[in-house]
Amino acid sequence: MNVKKGLFLGVLFAFFALGFIAIQKATPKAKEDRIYKEIKVYSPYRFEKRMGGLTIINKTTGKKEKPNAADALYRMDDLDKTWGKKHLKIVDNSVVVIGDHNQTVTKIFIKNIKEKKWVKKFFGI
């Protein structure tokens, strides 16, 4: 009886461990919340909820992408990074958002060196 109980607990633990690992892999790395939220306002990409998961919509073109649920957050990060390389630059202690016609849309103040490093690393600028 103890062997069956031990086997059951071992299998149960394995499922929990695998589930935890799967969640860790499906979640992208943490972002600097304040600066990311301010930059995200100007990004053309948005999530839309749908029955089967999430749809990514480009609000300037109306184009929709339907990645599978496990890849949706990673795909959004890829799109944001591509957009950021073209539309963001760092000038002194500010992130300058540049429009499609090379005009300055806004400047976002960088509060600390950690935010500056994160913007450079995440967006590759």
Image (spheres, rainbow, N blue to C red):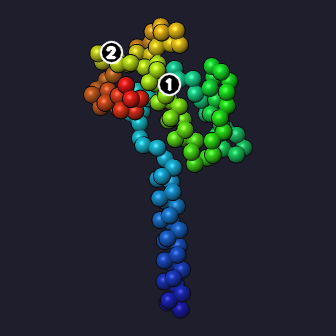
Q: Give the residue drawn at x 52%, y 9%.
A: 101
How many numbered marks have been drawn onto this rendered protein structure?
2
Image quadrant in which you'd find residue 89:
top left
Left/right of residue 72 with respect to residue 121 in the rendered view: right
Residue 90 image point, x, y percent: 35, 19
For disc 2, the marked residue is 91
Q: Give the spatial CA distance, label 1 vs label 2.
A: 18 Å
Q: Amino acid at mark 2?
A: Val
Per the rendering, the mark at residue 83 is 1
Residue 108 seen: no
Residue 18 visible in rendering: yes
Q: Amino acid at mark 1?
A: Trp
Q: In x, y percent, where is residue 14?
A: 49, 70
Location of residue 101 with respect to 93 vertically, above or below? above
The local secondary structure at tag 1 comes to: helix
Disc 1, disc 2: CB below 8 Å?
A: no
Report the residue at 41% width, 41% height from top: 30
For label 2, count other residues whose C-alpha is less than 10 Å away and answer few (under 14), some (14-19) or many (20+).
few
Q: How far across and how far down the image is residue 88, in percent?
A: 43, 20
Q: Along the polypeptide, which appears first: circle 1 or circle 2?
A: 1
Please tell me which residue is depicted at 68% across the width and 24% down the height of the picture: 62
Asked if residue 125 lies left or right of residue 28, the reply is left
Residue 101, numbered label: none
| Residue drawn at the location 54% of the way across and 80% of the way down | 8
